[in-house]
Image (tube, grey):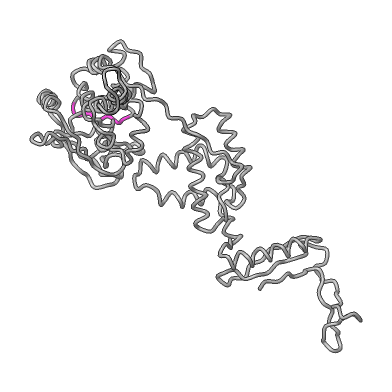
Amino acid sequence: MGHIQDRWYRQKIDPESGQPVFSSSGRPVLEKTELHGTGMRYKVRYLSPDNKERSKSFPDRQKRQAEDFLIGVEADKREGRYIDPAASAITFRQQAENWLKGQSPDPGTREVLRSRLTSRIYPSFGDVRVGRITPSMVRDWLGELEERRYASNYQVALFTLVSAVLDAAVDDRLIRDNPCKAKTVRRPVGASPRVVVWTEKRVHAVRAGLGERFGVTVPLGSGLGLRQGEILAISPDDIDRSAKVVLVQRQLKTVKGVQMFALPKGGKTRTVPASGGLIDVLDEYGEQFPPVEVKLPWRVPDGEPVAARLMVTGENGRLYSGDLFTKVVWQHAFKAAGLVYRPRADGMHGLRHFYASMLLARGVSVKELAEYLGHADAGFTLRTYTHLVPSSHERARQAIDAVFGPETDGLETA
C-alpha cells in the first residue's frame, strides 16, 4: 500500500528519549523540515505492479488531490488498469515508429504510411507525449484538416492512422484510453464516388491513341481487369493457352526510386479467365513486339533478383514506373485521340471498371468478379459496383404479373 509523504513537516522527536512527541490530545506534534516552503509539499509513494517504487508530487494545499491520486492508483492496480506515468512520457513519434515496424511487409505500403506521418501528422502530434494527447487536441487537428480542404477520404486515412498508433499505445499500456475514440470526437466520413464507366467508343479511342507499342495495355486492363502495375509486369509465360486463363502473379512497383517485382496487391496471386480472342490479340502483339527479359529485385529494393519476360516495355526494353507511364504515355494517348483527360475518371483504373461492367452485364456474379479483380472482400466489390449490377425490377414485375396480370385467372391458375 502506498503512502503520502509531507516534505514540509515531520513528527517531532524528543531529543532525550528519542521517542515521537504527541500533544495532550494524542495527536503527533509536527515540526518544519529543512525543505519547508520549497518545492512540492506532498509526495505520493507507491509500488507499481512490477514492485518498482513510483512517486508523484503535489503542491501545498493539494493533499486531497494527492489522496485521490493514491486511491486511484491502488484501484487501477487491483483492476489491472494501471498505467505507468513514465511510460506515457513516450512521444507520439516514438510510438508511431514502433507501430510502423509491425505493419505491412510491403515496403511501398510502409513508405506511404511514413510519408503521411511525416507530412501531415508529426507536425501536430510528433513531439507530444502520448499521455498528453487529449480529445480536444484531436478535434483541433481535425478542424485544421477541414480548413485545408483535404479530400474526405484523405482525412479518413489520416485519422485512421493516428487512431491506430494510439490503439497500439493502449495495447502497450502507455495510455488507458484512445482519445480518438472519445464521444466528443467526430470521425471523418469518407465519400464513395460513383464509378464512371467508359463507353466502348472511348476504350477503342484510347487504344488507338496509345499506338501499336502500348495499345496492348487496353485489352490487358479491360479484358483481364489488371491493375497498372500488373499490366506493366505481365509476361506471355503467365498465359495458359490450353486452359484459357492468365495467372496474375506479379506487379511492377517503385519504392524510393528502385523498381522491383512484388506480389499483386493484397499479397496473393489469382487466376483470371481469358477469351480465345483476347489470347490471340496478346499473341499477335508478342510477335510484333517480342517480350524482353528483365531481372529485378523481389519485394524489397535489396531483394533476391527475379527474372521475367515482360510484354509491355518501351523501345530497347525501357521500363516505365507507374507514375512515369501515366504522365508520358497514358495521358498523351488522350491528346492523340482528341479526348479530354479527366483526372479521376480516366486513370488506368478505368479499364478495370470497364471490365467489371462488362462481366456484371453478362451475369457474372459479384463473388466471381471479386476473385477476378483480386478483391479480398466481395462486399467491397459490391459496394463499388452495385449501381452496375443489372436491375431485377423487370423480372420482379413479370413474376407478379404471372399472378395478378390481366391475362391470368388469378392465384389458382398461377
- Identity of the residue drawn at 56% across and 31% down: 146
Quarter containing the N terminus: bottom right
| Residue 330, image x, y percentages | 29, 21
Magenta stretch holds residue 142 = no
Figure quadrant of residue 407: top left
Q: Nearer the viewer, residue 57 or 345?
A: 345
Side (left or right) of 11 relative to 326: right
On screen, residue 217 above or below 170:
above
Side (left or right) of 271 relative to 80: left
| Residue 391, image x, y percentages | 32, 24
The residue lying furthest to the top in this view is 338
- Identity of the residue drawn at 26% across and 33% down: 365
The residue lying furthest to the bottom in this view is 17
Q: Nearer the viewer, residue 188 or 344?
A: 188
Q: Which residues are magenta?
A: 316-322
| Residue 121, image x, y percentages | 53, 40
Q: Nearer the viewer, residue 134 or 129?
A: 134
**Residue 229 showing in the rendered view:** yes
Magenta stretch holds residue 317 = yes
On screen, residue 348 above or below 97:
above
Figure quadrant of residue 11: bottom right
The residue lying furthest to the left in this view is 242
Figure quadrant of residue 193: top left
On screen, residue 239 above or below 396:
below
Q: Nearer the viewer, residue 168 or 253?
A: 168
| Residue 38, image x, y percentages | 80, 63
- Identity of the residue drawn at 56% across and 54% down: 90
Quarter containing the C terminus: top left
On screen, residue 54 above or below 348:
below
Report how many numbered discs are placed on residues in the image.
0
**Residue 391 showing in the rendered view:** no
